[in-house]
Image (cartoon, helix red, strand yellow):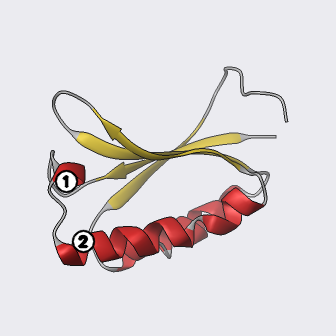
Amino acid sequence: MPTFVLRLIAPRPNFAQTLTDSEREIMNRHAAHWRPYLERGEMVVFGPVLTDEDSYGLAVVETDDEQALREFAAQDPVVTSATAAFELGRLAAGHVRER
């Protein structure tokens, strides 16, 4: 099954550490939005990544339907509210844990 990597592009480097109340509410809706992928077992990993320089969101999804994934990501509250954007790529090679 193809594996896709989504990188959430935050509006500022320290976004995860400096959320406003309205951004926190949007991020809570963002997490709830992805629950179907978690419940179906298609979400391998999902969450914020903190580095020394910045923060970003990371999701790794296994799915046969790239177009449905792209459409679902486009409906994410962080995208529809213009809070953040996604980069989506297909894992070209590598190893994903066994189900």
Residue, x 77% and y 52% (percent of image)? 41
> Is residue 59 shown above or below 85?
above
Q: Position of residue 29 (x, y in %)?
A: 44, 75
Q: Residue at x 67, y 22 (%)?
A: 93
Closer to us: 59 or 47: 47
Cα distance, mark 1 to mark 2? 9 Å
Disc 1 is placed on an element classified as helix
- Residue farthest along the right direction in this orientation: 99
Q: Is residue 50 left or right of residue 54?
A: right
The reply to whether discs 1 and 2 touch (Cβ–Cβ < 8 Å) is: yes
Residue in the foreground of this view, choosing between 46 and 86: 46
Q: Which residue is mark 2?
A: 23
Q: Decide if residue 67 is in sight here.
A: no
| Picture coordinates of residue 86, whole percent (x, y) | 40, 56
Which is nearer the eye, 53 or 17?
17
Which residue carries the number 1 mark? 15
Q: Considering only vertical position in the picture, is 35 above or below 92? A: below
Q: Amino acid at mark 1?
A: Phe
Q: Is residue 80 left or right of residue 89?
A: left
Quadrant holding the C terminus: top right
